[in-house]
Amino acid sequence: MRHPLVKNAEDRMNKAVEKISEELRKMRTGRPSPAILEEIKVDYYGAQTPISQLATVNITEDRALIIKPWDRSVLSSIEKAIFASDLGLTPQNDGNVIRLTFPTPTTEQRQKWAKKAKEIAEQGKIAIRNIRRDILKELKGDTKDGKISEDDEKRIEKEIQDLTDKKILEIDKLLEKKEKEIMEV
């Protein structure tokens, strides 16, 4: 049976990896993705509402996102929200749908995005290491208090280190995948 400290560490590390995965998924890359619109909120009858709850978002072959709201009266609000965001895209409103065209990014932009992805991944690795540090500190305290034998302490330390290595490897794989996606022409 696994020790509660190991289970706690695993739960916390899983959450950290999930957060990093989410952050990387929302990053802009060379190709359109509806995920980049998730953070944009639209003022809809006084409530800040995500675009995904107001419209369907589709990808076209010509490097564009088509946003088709279910209620056409919200078109201008969606357009304003996209303008106000930091996407750097200009929405084109034709009265029925909003088209977001993604220009082909320059090598410089791609490198900047890759650097940002590395920063996000590094934050995740730091979070994982901090979780390990906290759990090991708690483990040392339990050993001093006599709740855990020294043999068990060594075994649990190894489990936590293995878990840490595994989660850092997961983050590295997420980063590698994102960098590949960013550099894809």
Image (cartoon, helix red, strand yellow):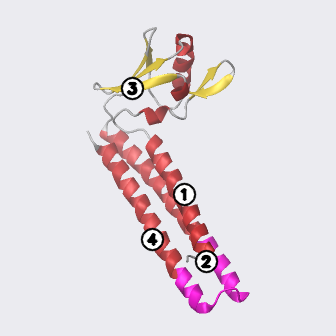
Residue 153 percent coordinates (x, y): 59, 86
Q: Relative to residue 16, is residue 24 depicted above or below?
A: above
Q: Which mark is residue 16?
A: 1
Give the residue at x 54% y 68%: 129
Label 2 to label 3: alpha-carbon separation = 47 Å
For the N terminus, the quadrant is bottom right
Please state the total of marks drawn on the protein image. 4
Label 3 to label 1: alpha-carbon separation = 30 Å
Q: Which residue is mark 3?
A: 58
Label 2 to label 1: alpha-carbon separation = 17 Å
Nearer to us of marks 2 and 3 is 3
Taking the magenta stretch, the answer to whether it contains residue 97 is: no
Q: Which mark is residue 183?
A: none
Q: Which residue is mark 2?
A: 136
Lower position in the chain sequence, tag 2 or tag 3: 3
Amino acid type, mark 3: Asn
Does 45 sit left or right of 17 as displayed? right
Q: Which residues are magenta?
A: 133-157
Q: Is 138 or 113 nearer to us in this picture?
A: 138
Q: Relative to residue 107, is residue 52 depicted above or below?
A: above
Q: Which residue is mark 4?
A: 165
Give the residue at x 52% y 60%: 14
Label 4 to label 1: alpha-carbon separation = 14 Å
Residue 168 percent coordinates (x, y): 45, 65
Give the residue at x 73% y 87%: 145
Disc 1 secondary structure class: helix
Nearer to us of marks 4 and 3 is 3
Disc 3 secondary structure class: strand
Say few, some or many: other residues with alpha carbon within 10 Å of mark 1 (under 14 / 14 to 19 / 20 or more). many
Lower position in the chain sequence, tag 4 or tag 3: 3
Residue 136 percent coordinates (x, y): 61, 77
